[in-house]
Amino acid sequence: MPDRRKASVRKRVLLVDDCEGVLRAYRRRLRAEGLDVAIACGVAAARLLLRTNVFDWVVVDLMMPAPGERNLTPIGLDLVEEIRQIAPSSGIVLMTAYPSFEAAARAGRLDTSIQWFLKTEPIADLVALVAMDVPLRHEIAPPDEATRVRERYLTALVATGGNYTEAASRLHVSRQAVQRFVKSDPPLAAMIEDAR
């Protein structure tokens, strides 16, 4: 029986990370699943590949050193902004071993269709993400009431280090309302749990 994954059009994936070992391991696994995978070790290499190729998905490490630097910064978010200009139809997965409330809030303001992958999760989860069809991109529009509420909750949670009671006090809502909000957003819930 023929392998249906290989019979259909293969999805093209660009992996961007500053660690060559991570790139090689992820590429090997994604290729084994029938995906066409390119790798970029760092932001500069990613920019070049994005300008000369078309990708269904771009998987970007959140924390990498800026070109010419050694310290890790959330430059992956800056690259996401560029991807939206260079390759607006590509789906984006932000991957990280260092989840943060600030990064989640900024990514949500950039594009609500961004997917998240925690490096502590099984690579099968990343395979499942990039095997999906690219979600429809949500254009950035003036925030509606739900978005304004979400940003208020995220801001309160960041300011209180994920403390539900203190966040509820700042928001003038019940602690249960804050808990429901967090439970409705699995990546945020994981980040809060990791921060504790």
Image (cartoon, grey):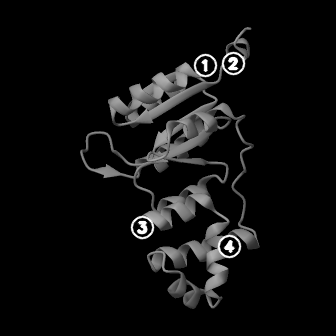
Residue holding disc 2: 5
Mark with earlier residue (3, 2): 2
Closer to the camera, 47 or 13? 13
Mark with earlier residue (1, 2): 2
**Which quadrant holds the C terminus?**
bottom left
Residue holding disc 1: 34
Residue 101 appears in the figure: no
Residue holding disc 4: 148
Coordinates of residue 115 in the picture (x, y in percent): 61, 47
Measured Cα–Cα span from mark 3 to mark 2: 38 Å
Residue at image x 69%, y 13%? 3
Q: Is residue 16 above or below residue 178?
A: above
Coordinates of residue 107 in the picture (x, y in percent): 56, 55
Coordinates of residue 177 in the picture (x, y in percent): 67, 81
Q: Is residue 112 above or below residue 59?
A: below
Count of marks placed on residues: 4
For label 4, the crowd category at 10 Å Cα-Cα, with few meaning under 14, some 14 to 19 and many 20 or more, is few
Task: Residue type at mark 3: give it.
Answer: Ala
Residue holding disc 3: 195
